[in-house]
Structures are given as C-alpha cells and as structure tokens.
Amino acid sequence: MSLEIEEQSKQNDYVTVDVNSDVVDGLSAFNPVGLNQQFASSQRRSPISTVGVGDVLSVTVFEADEGGLFSGKSGNRAEFPRVEVNNQGYISLPYTGTIKVNGKTPLQIQELVVENLEGKAIQPQALVNVVRNESNLVTMSGDVAKPGLYPVTSKAERLLDVVAEAGGTKFPARETYITLMRGEQQGIQLMKTVIEQPSENIYVSRGDRIYLSHDPQRYTVLGAVLKPSIYTFDAATISVLEAIAAAGGLMDERADATGVFVFRYEDPKVLDTLGIPYKRLVRGQVPTIYRINMKHAQSYFYAQSFHLRDKDSVFVTNARSVEISKVLMLLNQATSSVGNVARTSNRFD
C-alpha cells in the first residue's frame, strides 16, 4: 500500500512528503493568515469613537464671567442633557445654530460649540459627552451567552472585550470559531488562537458583525489500528502519536509501521517554505500526504511533534504479508469450493 501511494502520487495531482526534522520544524513555524493580517489596514492604531446619527449627547456650556448668555441660578453655565443627532448628522443648541457633528469626536464637537459661541458668550468653554451610543455599535451573535448590539467606546474595545461583554462563549475556546465581518471583508479564527496570540485580538470597529460558532475540531484514524473512527480534539493540540494511541494503537499482526500517513489539504505557502513542488490546487489548497516511517526510532519523535489540524486523516497501512494472507485465504476458499463440488459430483456417480 505504501508503495502504491508513492507510485500514484507521481501520476496524480497530490504530493507525498517524507516527514523529517526539517518538515516538522517548517510545519511548527508556519502561521496561517489570521485576523491581524487580514484586517491590517484598520489595525495600525486604536479606533477613535466618533458620533453618528441617533446618538444622544449631553452638552454643558460655561462662561468666564456673570452677565453672559448663559448666566442664571445655576451660575455661569447651561446644561443640555439630551441632544440627539438628527438624520442629517446635525445638532442644534441655543445661540450656536445647527452644528454638523456626524463623524466627529466629542472633543471636536466641543471645539465647534466654542467656535460658534465666539463673540456671543463670555470666553465660552464646552463639555460634550455621549449619553447614549446608537451609531458606534457592533453586532454579537451565535454561541454567546448574551447576543445583541454592543457599543464601541473611546477606550477602543478588542474582540475579547466584546465577547466578555456578551457573557462569554457557551463552549470551550478550542471548539469555538470567531468570524468577523467588516464591510465586504470576512475573517475567521479559532477562539483559542485569539486568546493565546494577542495580535489576533484585534480592535473592533463600528458596524462590525461578530459571530461565534461551535465547531469541534476533528480528525480521522483509519487502517490497521484497534479503534478506527472519527475523534474530536480533547486537548489544545493532538500529535500523530497521540492520535494513534487514542485509536488503540497499531495492530501488531496487521500494521505496516513503515506506512503511517497523514492526509491533509495543505496551505501552498507551507510547501513553498519547505521547497516542495506541487501541480494542482483544490479550493486554494494542495492535496498532501505526509508519510512517517515508524520503524526508525527518530520517527517517534517526529510523530510526537507533528500536530494534526482540523479534518486531518491518519491512515495506517496493512503489512504486505497481511495482503498476501488475504489472497491466500481467497484462493483457499475458491479451491475448497471446487473440492466440495467435486466430492458432491462423485457421490452421484
């Protein structure tokens, strides 16, 4: 079987790679494109919260002396606790007229208020706060405790901040994927990776849609093992050696230790890094078979360091003697049948 796979790989469009220390090191060092790279253009600095249509502001105006426009019982100031940004992005205050605030920060709006009161009020100053945020929102849905709309404030929230605000995930991080949709862009990452790699915990922006989905990572073990089946990752990482052990180990009387294979659709960048040529891409990936010869002592270390990925398949081939035994068994059955027919025929003679 091992030889058949190698021969067919020369004729077909998949790649066969013998696992050695260079391959293991190359696979361990490879980092696929994540959220940080995919949304790099909007992650160079933390986003600044700006005011939008529907937001409600509180505006307080101060004057430096009595007798001004806003002098009264409360002193030299006037408070406007609920000022809503209209559909055109404007607010209106006494003596200032309409001010376009859409896309402005609270600090910029303060400066505009003061500018519009110059020459009317006595050395005016202004204080602007967002009372209710209706425009700087992100949508959180899927497998979170409290799906809904969550505000993006001036402190600049990251993905994990919003997930925590939504009550956290319903399932373990290693079984949960986080999908971020921003305009026409979309990226997906394992929640465990977002937690472990700070660079993947990117800033959220107004209008982001965040979806958490429960999708346990799985691998398949087939061939000459005691318990061939589909298994879920019960730990953060699973090596080939651990996968074989989970399947009950190799069958001593059947397994060909030279033929332990890992079937995977590999990222072409990995093969480029390893200097391995390939012919064809399938949905952007390269059909790849990694071969580990377990008869060599060092291969056990390779199998221990070779980590499986979601949807990988491990296949242990049968020994050639087993294949020959199957043929002999079929021949024996055939000859036995012929013998039975002959003996039955003789009884009638």
Image: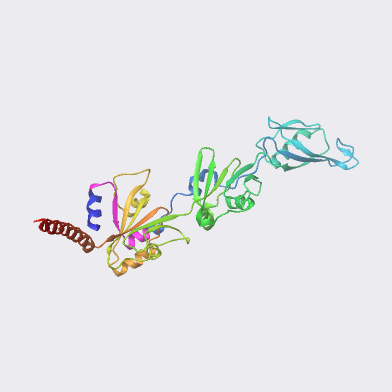
Picture coordinates of residue 139 (x, y %)?
60, 43
Where 337 sits versus 79, above or below?
below
Residue lying furthest left in this view? 349
Q: Is residue 22 magenta?
A: yes
Q: Residue 340 occupies which quadrant of the picture? A: bottom left
Decide which of 9, 348 is in the foreground and name it: 348
Asked which quadrant contains residue 299, the reply is bottom left
Residue under the image location 53 percent in, 56 percent down: 173
Image location (x, y in percent) of residue 120: 82, 33
Question: Which residue is the extreme one toward the front?
Answer: 348
- Side of 9 where 84 appears, left or right: right
Tell me which residue sits at (49%, 47%) in the image.
Answer: 188
**Number of marks drawn:** 0
- Is 142 or 65 nearer to us in this picture? 142
Q: Determine if the magenta segment contains residue 17.
A: yes
Q: Quadrant of the C terminus?
A: bottom left
Quadrant that contains the N terminus: bottom left
| Apparent side of residue 86 relative to residue 258 in the rendered image (left or right) | right
Q: Nearer the viewer, residue 62 or 348?
A: 348
Residue 280 locus on image (x, y percent): 31, 44
Q: Residue at x 51, y 45 (%)?
A: 39
Q: Which residues are magenta?
A: 11-26
Q: Residue 148 falls in which quadrant of the image?
A: top right
- In percent of width and height, residue 40 lies at 51, 46
Above or below, comparing residue 18 to residue 280 in the picture = below
Q: Residue furthest right?
A: 73
What scheme was used to colour the molecule?
rainbow
Q: Would residue 91 be found to the left or right of residue 205 on screen?
A: right
Q: Would residue 131 be found to the left or right of residue 254 on screen?
A: right
